[in-house]
Image (tube, rainbow, N blue to C red):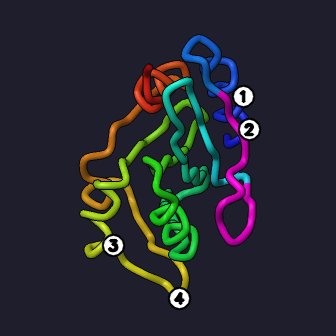
Amino acid sequence: MLNELTSGLQSCSGPVGGSLHKWHGGAKATGSLLELGSKSGKILLYVKERSDPPEFWGLNQNQLAAIQTAGVPWFAVRLAGVPDRVFVLSSDQVRKNMPSWSQSKADFKLHEGNEIHGSIEFTSFAALPAHLVPQS
């Protein structure tokens, strides 16, 4: 699913002058942390995928800490089930909801429903760049 999202974002980001690549600002570069840019700025995407039930979202505390200090807008993106089912939470929504999420030693665990309250759901990768990438 992450490959499909990445391919979809790369093919759609051209009209808004965007680029997409791994973000190297954290402790380690991972395919889950992506930098999406445009002529007017950049954003970070923390992408997690899960296709097997129960569908939950594990957000690593160290990765969250790194992107929160990056100084650029960021979003948590969850790929659930089929490739074109995408949930997006803004950084403000993540910070607001974090106190109510269950935690393991290193991760916050989220499930569909109240735990991703306020997320925006997309059924097409084509809609993401217009929603996420800063426009000039």
Q: In this view, does 74 lie to the left or right of 28?
A: left
What span is colored magenta in the figure?
19-30
Residue ID for mark 2: 3
Quadrant assignment for the N terminus: top right
Residue ID for mark 4: 105
Please give the name of the residue rendered at 50% of the width and 67% of the height, measured from the top-left corner: 64
Q: Is label 4 in a helix, a strand or a loop?
A: loop
Please give the name of the residue rendered at 43% of the width and 47% of the height, measured from the top-left corner: 73
Disc 3 residue type (three-letter)? Trp
Q: Relative to 36, say whether 58 is above or below.
A: below
Please give the name of the residue rendered at 44% of the width and 32% of the height, measured from the top-left corner: 132
How far is the residue under mark 3 from the one under mark 4? Answer: 13 Å
| x then y, percent, for residue 14 | 64, 16
State if disc 2 and disc 1 touch (CB < 8 Å).
yes
Q: Relative to 64, say whether 125 is above or below.
A: above
Q: Quadrant of residue 99?
A: bottom left
Disc 1 residue type (three-letter)? Ser
Residue 26, magenta (yes or no): yes
Disc 2 residue type (three-letter)? Asn
Q: In this view, does 92 lie to the left or right of 110?
A: left
